[in-house]
Amino acid sequence: MEEAPVRFELVDINEILKTLPHRYPMLLIDRVIKIRTDYSGIGIKNVTFNEPPFLGHFPERPVYPGVMMIEAMAQTAGVIGIKSVEGTEKPRAVYFLTIDKCKFRKPVMPGDTIEYHMRSIGRRKAMWWFHGDAKVNGSVVAEADVGAMLTD
């Protein structure tokens, strides 16, 4: 099966800040690459030890929280949706609707780079549903179907 053409090769952090309303410490992606015309793309997160979650999750064995990976999937999906639809480039709120079929397969540690492979599985007006696979070094560490709504 052929991949859809790439519409945006790179959405860097400066463009993400113009696209999503999230800010530190809740902006959980560093860039989005290869946003395709079929509403798929890859969010990138470089996990570092000095991030706030590691103060308590867990100090002796730092593990990146799974719920933050799911939030990052939704943020990646938000960037893909907002950038892909003409006239939606201004900052908008992105609200969770659903989280389904969520599984955590392996722990993510400081020093890892997470790739959030997101693809659209449905859309109705301002509501979007995506399937996401979070990968580290090509291995799936988490997966979920997320639904979100874009609002002004």
Image (spheres, rainbow, N blue to C red):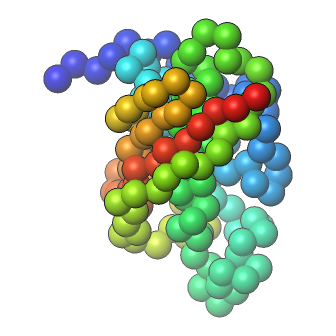
Point out residue 127 in the picture as x, y percentages from the top left corner.
52, 33
Residue 29, above or below 122: below
In the image shown, does 85 or 150 lie closer to the viewer?
Answer: 150
Point out residue 15 in the picture as x, y percentages from the top left corner.
74, 25
Q: Indicate the quadrant where residue 8 lies.
A: top right
In the image shown, does 95 or 61 lie closer to the viewer?
Answer: 95
- Name the residue rendered at 49%, 34% in the picture: 128
Q: Is residue 51 left or right of residue 105?
A: right
The number of discs equals 0
* Quadrant of image for the C terminus: top right
In the image shown, does 78 or 151 lie closer to the viewer?
Answer: 151
Point out residue 100 in the picture as x, y percentages from the top left corner.
40, 57
Residue 20, above or below 46: above
In the image shown, does 4 or 44 lie closer to the viewer?
Answer: 4
Q: Indicate the quadrant where residue 63 lies.
A: bottom right
- Name the residue rendered at 70%, 32% in the picture: 151
Q: Is residue 84 left or right of residue 89?
A: left
- Name the residue rendered at 72%, 72% in the picture: 53
Residue 76 in view (yes/no): no
- Name the residue rendered at 65%, 45% in the picture: 95
Residue 71, above or below 18: below
Point out residue 11 in the picture as x, y percentages from the top left corner.
64, 25
